[in-house]
Amino acid sequence: MFNLVVLTGRLTADPELKTTSNGTSVVSFSIAVDRRYRAGEERQTDFINIVAWRSSAEFISKYFKKGSLIGIEGSIQTRRYTDKNGNNRTAFEVIANNVQFVESKRDGAATSSEPASFSNADVNDFADLGSASDDDLPF
């Protein structure tokens, strides 16, 4: 099974970094994503809820603001809850695994010397190949 979402859109509000009770950073925000349309058709926009955790959340809150164009790779997640009126509801949101700038600094995006993309990968996530030759590689 496969659950992969790739989106490009504009933030609808400034992201607000929050911290869980155990100290984990999280940011929730939405992006406006235009649907494909043909000439003569009215343009339609979807508003997609996004959640980012840990260092991705910190990265987003530091370098993106309302109107920033952002690229997101992640997966769809659903959660069920009961609203204040006692109705059962289901929320759909994208959990961001990788985010990146889509605009250049000239276009009004980030104003930092940080790299143009960010991933949750850590140096410990990769195995050392040591002195393996090309013949030892599995591809």
Image (cartoon, rainbow, N blue to C red):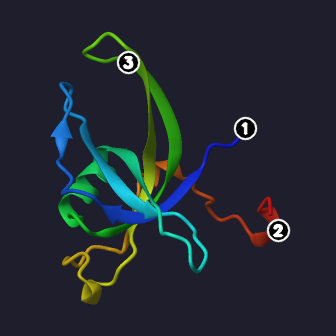
* Residue receiving disc 2: 135
> How crowded is the residue under tag 3: few (<14 C-alpha within 10 Å), some, or many (20+)?
few
Between residue 77 and residue 82, name the one nearer to us.
82
Q: Circle 2 — which element?
A: helix
Between residue 79 and residue 123, name the one nearer to us.
79
The answer for how far apart the CA atoms under marks 3 and 1 are is: 25 Å
* Residue receiving disc 1: 1
At label 3, the amino acid type is Tyr
Which is nearer the N-term, disc 3 or disc 1? 1
At label 1, the amino acid type is Met
Q: Quadrant of residue 70?
A: bottom left
Q: Position of residue 87 (x, y in %)?
A: 37, 14
* Residue receiving disc 3: 81
Would residue 65 appear left or right of 70 to someone viewing this image? Answer: left
Q: Position of residue 93 (x, y in %)?
A: 43, 40
Q: Nearer the viewer, mark 2 or mark 3?
A: 3
In the image, is residue 73 above or below residue 24? Answer: below
The answer for how far apart the CA atoms under marks 2 and 3 are is: 53 Å
